[in-house]
Image (cartoon, rainbow, N blue to C red):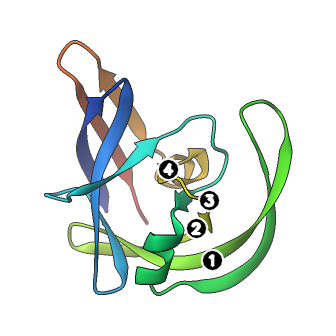
Amino acid sequence: MRVRVSGRMVSGEPRLPSRIAGKRLILGGKGREHLILDSGFTGSIAISEEWANRLDLRYAGIQPFELANGQIVEFPTYLGSVRFGQMEALFEFIVSGETLLGMEFFERLAARIVIDCPSSKVKVDGEMS
């Protein structure tokens, strides 16, 4: 199934709208919150503790991540639901204090990301099987 999400550049950061509803993360649409696209984050989704308390997450284990500076850190990981329009899938989350979408997330979608700086538009196109 095709996944399309549009966002905006804000203060030099590519952001996608998001919200939490029914204990799941809803990506896209009219979300009042946002997730930052972070190509330096090797994981899937990073969220704040406040968001984690509002989502239905299941502990999945400890996983190492490489930071942009090359440092390896370990975080507990959790599985939770992410919804795109009518489609829903399980993704891996870490609780880090930031709200980020990382490369593992985009690789799973086989995503094409377009950041149009002059218009401040961000587009993500991908596929979920």
Q: Residues within 10 Å of mark 1 (few under 14, many from 20)?
A: many
The residue furthest left is 30
- Residue type at mark 2 is Phe
Q: Is residue 19 left or right of residue 101?
A: left
Q: Residues within 10 Å of mark 4 (few under 14, many from 20)?
A: many
If the image is split into quadrants, where does the N terminus sit?
bottom left
- Residue type at mark 4 is Leu
Tell me the residue that label 4 is attached to: 100
Q: Residues within 10 Å of mark 3 (few under 14, many from 20)?
A: some
Q: Is residue 75 left or right of residue 94?
A: right
- Residue type at mark 1 is Tyr
Tell me the residue that label 3 is attached to: 96
Lower position in the chain sequence, tag 1 or tag 4: 1
Residue nearest the viewer, comparing 120 with 50: 50
Tell me if residue 112 comes above or below residue 106 in the rendering. Answer: above
Quadrant assignment, res 86: bottom left
Tell me the residue that label 2 is attached to: 93
Q: CA distance from mark 1 to mark 4?
A: 15 Å
Tell me the residue that label 1 is attached to: 78
| Contact check, label 3 and label 2, Cβ < 8 Å | no
Q: CA distance from mark 3 to mark 4?
A: 9 Å
Q: Residue at x 36, y 85 (%)?
A: 23
Q: Residue at x 69, y 72 (%)?
A: 77
